[in-house]
Image (tube, rainbow, N blue to C red):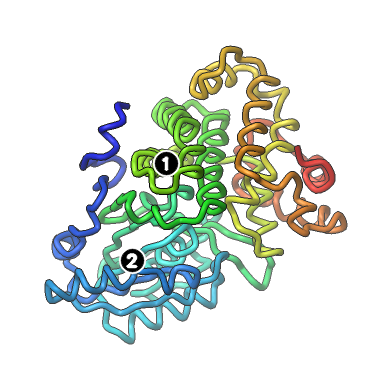
Amino acid sequence: MKENHLLAGHDWSFPVPIAYGPGRLAELPQHCAAAGMKNPLLMSDRGSASLPFIDRCQQLLAAQGISTGVFTAVSPNPREHEIEAAAAAFRHGQHDGIIAMGGGSGLDGAKATCLTALNDIDLWAFNYDVAVPDVSAAQPFPPLICIPTTSGTGAETESTAMITDTQRGMKLCVWHPTLKPSLALLDPELTLALPAHLTAWTGVDALVHAIEAYCVPDYHPLCDGIALESMALAHRWLRTAVAEPDNLTARGGMQIAACLGGIAFLKGLGLVHAISHMVGADFDTHHGLTNAVALPAVMRFNKPAMTDKLAPMAAALGLEQDDFDTFYRALCQLLDDLDIPVSLGELGIPLEAAGELAAKAHLDAAAGSNIRSASVAEIEQVIIDAIEVGR
């Protein structure tokens, strides 16, 4: 991709309508009108509640006669009772759509709210691992516009949302195949204020999505090609985005990398995410950071199964050799350059938690699509390795 392409506006239609380009947040009122929104609920997370893009959205919409409500009581790892409160706010305010803004937690909270706002179906009936619930045509899902303000989760093009079940102490994926965002609006200007450490954590999250999706042992050439392009963009632009926070080209490259990673993992994920989901549920760690720290230990476990995957991934990273050790060292060097903590132990995860985390991770859908099958005991050893050794 030519660098000047990252500073221009582009419209894409796959897998949902996507509007990319610096400054395109200004188009939000016309997109709301096209989606039939006259009184949307603007949703984000607690960490984003005081950031200027919330006020800017309200001002843009108010200038065109579109009223809004705001709900930002969403945790970094969204919980089921927060979704219940958001759905109640949606109904009480008689809203007719949802605008999701923020990082993964804000987007996931908004998508989960869409699932339940206009029906009486329990949130966990939308669990990805159970039969898809019937949703009455008389109670369709509200229209949804997703606007990411970080470059990591890629959560803007699909209905899947990771929500913490506080009773079970697990993160579960909820979704419905007929809930699709009306639009994903990618404006890299919204990421310029992202601090260096969050730029790094969310950026590695995007890279992990691409790596794990590409390594899923299913034949899916669409997702595989998208994953490789995501890797190439992340490797090209992540260090620059961290070192030069006002570099709009780097910010744009990372926002596209993240979006592509989110599309790619429709194919599936792997043990990094299975472990990270449960660590986040139990210890409230940042998802991207947890992924970054867990990645090396999982890669060492997956090494025997990765032989056929290495050459294309090494090429995406611009490496001269395509053996496992070269690829592994390149990733570890990236983590070092980004000041990622070395081990889960440094994040405060105690060794005695490894067994319970492993039992929960084994139930995660991402464990089932890992490139190498793993028993509970093997996952426990990977977690111990990530706590004690890391990289």
Q: Nearer the viewer, residue 65 or 309?
A: 65
| Measured Cα–Cα span from mark 1 to mark 2 | 19 Å
The crowding category of the residue bearing disc 2, from other C-alpha atoms within 10 Å (few below 14, some 14 to 19, many at least 20), is: some
Quarter in which the N terminus is drawn: top left
- What element does badge 1 sit on? helix
Tell me, for residue 230, which label it has, or none. Answer: none
Q: Is residue 84 above or below residue 287?
A: below
Q: Residue at x 52, y 35 (%)?
A: 213
Examine the rendering and report whether any part of residue 220 can be seen.
Answer: no
User: Percent from the top left, x then y, of residue 17?
Assistant: 24, 47
Q: Residue at x 57, y 36 (%)?
A: 212
Examine the rendering and report whether any part of residue 65 can be seen.
Answer: yes
Q: Is residue 377 left or right of residue 334?
A: right
User: Percent from the top left, x then y, of residue 189?
Assistant: 32, 52
User: Percent from the top left, x then y, of residue 167?
Assistant: 67, 73
- In this figure, what is the number of numbered marks? 2
- What element does badge 2 sit on? helix
Q: Residue at x 57, y 28 (%)?
A: 217
Furthest residue in direction top, as rendered: 321
The answer to whether the residues at label 1 and label 2 have Cβ atoms under 8 Å apart is no
Amino acid residing under circle 2 = Phe
The part of the image, by quadrant, that contains residue 134 is bottom left
Q: Is residue 166 left or right of residue 27?
A: right
Quarter in which the C terminus is drawn: top right
- Mark 1 lies on residue: 254
- Mark 2 lies on residue: 53
Q: Residue at x 36, y 49 (%)?
A: 157
Q: Nearer the viewer, residue 311 or 124?
A: 311
The crowding category of the residue bearing disc 1, from other C-alpha atoms within 10 Å (few below 14, some 14 to 19, many at least 20), is: many
User: Percent from the top left, x then y, of residue 164?
Assistant: 59, 66
Amino acid residing under circle 1 = Met
